[in-house]
Amino acid sequence: MSPLLQTFANGSALGYRSRSAVAGSYESIATVTVGSGGAASAEFTSIPSTYTHLQIRAITNNPSTVTNYITFNNDNGSNYSWHYIYGDGSSVVAGGGATQTNMTSLIYSSTSSNIFFASVVDILDYANTNKYKTARSLTGWDTNGGGSIHLRSGLWQNTNAITSIKVAAGSGNFAQYSHFALYGIKSA
């Protein structure tokens, strides 16, 4: 069964809680919706260690910048790495960074008024204390003839379980109606 059909079958993606989660199902942990005036960041704290993986689903707009940052457990040390590839239908760009103080642009933003980027970030084995943490994202936007698609990944060189996640705007604020949802994924 496909993950989407399985998710709808157990109802957890629709906001309903079942008594026991089906392996591979998504359970809502928390959401943040930006109000009027915007917000410089969205943060998830006290993340339980009862899941195998985490997923952030976001729609974002930031009039100041497309670049946003993710950090785990309030760690701003130089132990993050990231890389990306993206295309817009006519060109492709790739790059990355090592020994960084955050994971850059796993969640991207549009700077155009009323256009929002959609992002899905998977954080793998977030509670495993025997390995470094990795994340991957698929993000993009479309304007009926324009837009881009981005594949990005990040590494946090730390074996601690992830108990908090902060998504911060590179500058300015996330615009009103930007939305962040954190899900836990049960093991198969």
Image (spheres, grey):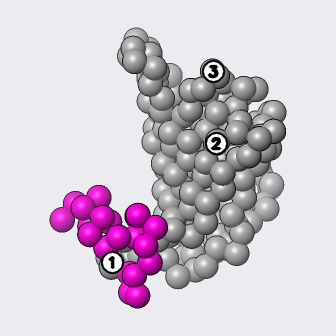
Residue 61, relative to residue 182: is it above or below?
above
User: Marks 3 and 1: CB-CB under 8 Å?
Assistant: no
Q: Residue at x 72, y 58 (%)?
A: 43
Which residue has dot 2 on it? 178
Front: mark 2 or 1: 2
73 or 48: nearer the eye? Answer: 48
Q: Which residue, given by chain and number where applicable, does mark 1 sit on?
A: 23
Question: Is residue 102 toward the left or the right of residue 115 in the image?
Answer: right
Mark 2 residue element: loop
Find residue 124 and report its horizontal and vertical position in percent: 49, 63
Q: Is residue 162 above or below residue 87?
A: below
Number of marks in the image? 3
Amino acid type of the residue tagged 2 in the rendering: Ser
Task: Look at the image and tell me whether residue 46 can be seen.
Answer: yes
Which residue reaches farthest bottom? 19
Mark 2 or mark 3, earlier in chain: 3
Task: Work out whether residue 17 or residue 187 is closer to the camera in this orientation and state it.
Answer: 17
Mark 3 or mark 1: name the one nearer the start of the chain.
1
Q: Nearer the viewer, residue 78 or 145?
A: 145
Q: Quadrant of the N terminus?
A: bottom left
Instruction: Give the CA separation, mark 2 to mark 3.
Output: 13 Å
Find residue 164 and report its horizontal and vertical position in percent: 70, 67
Residue of label 3: 112
**Residue 3 counted in the magenta span:** yes
Q: Residues within 10 Å of mark 3 (few under 14, many from 20)?
A: few
Instruction: Give the image location of residue 99, x and y in percent.
Output: 72, 46
Instruction: Give the magenta-colored segment's residue range.
Output: 1-21
Q: Is 66 displayed left or right of 77 in the figure? A: left
Look at 72% across and 26% down and name the residue there.
63
The amino acid type of the residue labelled 1 equals Ala
